[in-house]
Image (cartoon, helix red, strand yellow):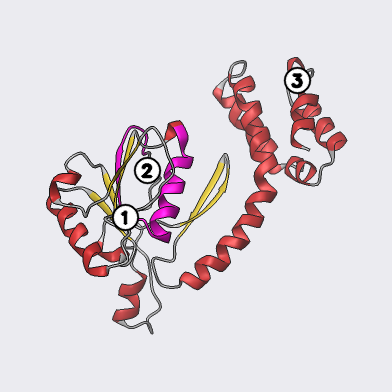
Amino acid sequence: MLLPTFPSSMDASAKKSMARKYYPIHLSLRGKCCVLVGFGRVGQRKLQRLLAMGSFGPASIMVFDPQIKEVPKAPNLTVYQQTLDETCIDRADIVFACTNDPHENARICALCRAKHVLCNAASDPDNGDVALPAIIDADPLCLTLSTQGTSPALAKKWRKELEVWAASKHAMLCCMARLRPLLVATMSSEENAALFTTLANGPLETYLHQGETAKALQYLTTHLPPHLKDVLPEIVNDLT
């Protein structure tokens, strides 16, 4: 197992701050029960993202806030105009503590720990189990970025830079996604691996990103099996 190495001049506190606090993971919430406590600006953003997941999102979302006035209507959303007590999380798979009161968020985290329920604490991420990274969503490409709380300013800056980078890769990824099922059905795994490696390392990405339709079509026609010739113009035209 390879362990991280640090410069000999780095003191113990700096080494500790660089240690990974979280296990990186993309978590599916499909069919899960999510509890959202607090419906200020942070809570509203979290709810918006949960609802945007559609059929891939939670089966049920419960929102708790004694001062709540209005929320979006959704078939899987239930609103409670009250504070959270321990019985409210009996069905929960994950809880988002988003109130404006750090003490209340800490109380919610303690309740979750007692019941072994994952919790994200907006005001103090280290007090919960789940930290939410910055997200760069260029479907089907999804990137997440976290400085583990060391520099939110840099995370914001780098997210904008990654958004530009992801946009430049989007057409290539969509092309590969369209081609993959067509090739997997007719070629061996070894042939597929070799062909996709060739495509990934060739000029196709540049052609697609720059909208060079003729060059992209010629490249694919040259490298792909003849039986795909008729479908290639549609794929390339859709992406350029």
Residue 214: mark: none
> Going from the N terminus, do you reach mark 1 or mark 2 first?
2
SS for tag 3? loop
Residue identified by numbered label 1:
130
Residue identified by numbered label 3:
231
Which label lies toward us, 3 or 1? 1
Assess whether mark 1 and mark 3 are in contact (beta carbons under 8 angstroms): no
- Chain part drawn in magenta: 29-54
SS for tag 2? loop
SS for tag 1? loop
Q: Amino acid at mark 2?
A: Leu
In this figure, what is the number of numbered marks? Answer: 3
Residue 27: mark: 2
Q: Quadrant of residue 202?
A: top right
Which label lies toward us, 3 or 2? 2
Q: Amino acid at mark 1?
A: Val
Assess whether mark 2 and mark 1 are in contact (beta carbons under 8 angstroms): yes
Residue at 33%, 59% (x, y): give it. Answer: 98
